[in-house]
Image (spheres, helix red, strand yellow):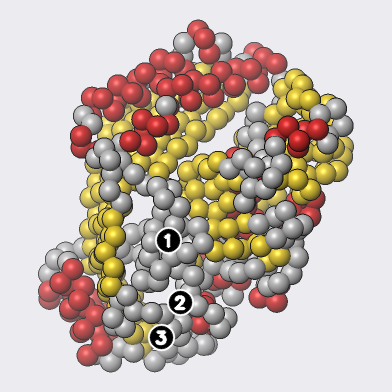
Amino acid sequence: MKELADLAVELAVRLGADYAEARFQGDFKNVYILRNGNPEAAGFSKDRGMGIRVIVNGNLGFASLNVEDERLVRRRVTDAISMAKASTKLLKKPIRLSKEKAVERSWDVKPKVPFEEVSVEDKMEMLFDIDKVVTSKEVKASIPYRLFELIESRVEKHYVNSEGTLISCSVPRILFRGVLTALGEGGSTEQDIVRKGESSGWEAVKKWNLIEHVGERAKTLGRILREAVSPPKGKVDVVLGSQVVGLIVHESVGHPCEADRILGREAAQAGESFITVGMLGSRIGPEEVTVVDDPTLENSYGFYLYDDEGVEARRRFLIKEGVINEFLHNRETAFELGVQSNASARASRFDKEPIVRMANTFMMPKDYDFEELLEGVHLGVYIRTFGEWNIDDRRYNMRFVGRECYLIKNGVLMNMVRRPILEITTLGFYGSIDAVDKTLSFEAATCGKGDPPQGIPVWHGGPNVRIRDIEVI
């Protein structure tokens, strides 16, 4: 496939392409499932193939194949060229790419404990042990519905373009997902979803200590059902936990800062953005607020060093000290706005076109201790984790329902409160922040975007944050 990728680019240029690229991608996945104490059929998949993109007179063409056949490669290159030429009458503005440095680089994530060194029996035994803890008497809760998934994957890529860039990489990833639904008196329910993910080998699972971690989350569900009372209503101060802050910045900063949304391309695929090009440099919050997207965090679930257009990755400061600082770009949007690409082009599979995507999006920590966030609150709510959330297509109006939450009274955490609802606009949220603590934690997720949909691995996270005088429903 690597040799065929080189051939595809050479042939496309000979057939008149102004620009050509080929990306071989192999995705290998093992899935282990335990549902309500019963193992389900494991999934073992291998997807290998090549995507070919060309630009002819400002028009884009894309084709893919999953068979190692030189004649088929030639046919697909011809298809891509024909598609680009056929788009001439449809395209209002020619596609141009930002000028980027040609590089040759091979990089890998080396697992300390490769997945194949741990037996299938041991992996399933761990899931059974988690289930035993969740259903034990110590949890003090009825959890009739339990789903545990362990997903091992490895992606291999070989990328080449007509400008001389050549990138090869191999990245293993591990993801654990647990869904717990607890049943209380009168048919009341609470649900929790536990996610852990890294770009590494089995050593990550050992570090997570899942049996204890999931057991504690199960105990918390029981406490909510037994102990939680109604939250205070009206305007109060709110302290948001890292998990909630991470989701908020992902949805209300990461997505609206995707330049393809801002320029209108994504409107029919994954929504719009309240941000306009003219808002660059505008203040959105106080100096305490800095939100970054960083693919280069070692072992992060969204880790990469070069994107799927061969551009070197770096930390992107989306909001810097309260000011909208930069957008997420691929080479096409970067050219249109007169900047360099910041390596935000990602594709989920070989047969998908790379589009503008996040990696690891989080709010930067500051200097407060968590206790100091509480000290300034006379009456408020600490929303440690979320249960439900909604946000509109423009990523402006948000609604979050808390799961593990506590009353704050005179700077002290009191009893648990159940399902406080925070409804707020994006500008209202960031404008209300007055303190950010020094902790930083992350949660793994699969970010969705595109049509057909492309799910990609990401982290989102942040510190604990205090917001003032907020309406709680």
Residue 117 spot, x, y in % from top left: 20, 34
Mark 1–mark 2 distance (CA, rounded to whole Å): 21 Å
Q: What residue type is labelled 2?
A: Arg
Residue 30 spot, x, y in % from top left: 27, 40
Q: In this view, does 50 lie above or below 240?
A: below
Q: Residue at x 68, y 42 (%)?
A: 437
Badge 1 or badge 2: first in the primary sequence: 2
Q: In which quarter of the image is residue 373?
A: top right
Element class at badge 1: loop
Q: Mark 3 points at which residue?
A: 59
The quarter of the picture where the N terminus appears is bottom left
The answer to whether 11 appears left or right of 445 in the picture is: left
Q: Is residue 203 above or below residue 200?
A: above
Mark 3–mark 1 distance (CA, rounded to whole Å): 21 Å
Q: Which amino acid does label 1 sit on?
A: Pro
Q: Mark 1 points at which residue?
A: 452
Q: Residue at x 30, y 21 (%)?
A: 125
- Check the image and name the residue furthest to the top: 137
Q: Can residue 456 be seen in this view?
A: no
Question: Residue 408's mark?
Answer: none
Mark 3–mark 2 distance (CA, rounded to whole Å): 14 Å
Q: Which residue is drawn at 12% across and 74% down?
A: 70
Q: Name the residue under label 2.
A: 331
Structural crowding at the residue carrying mark 3, measured as other residues with C-alpha within 10 Å and reported as few (<14), some (14–19) or many (≥20) = many
Badge 3 or badge 1: first in the primary sequence: 3
Residue 58 spot, x, y in % from top left: 42, 88
The quarter of the picture where the C terminus appears is top right
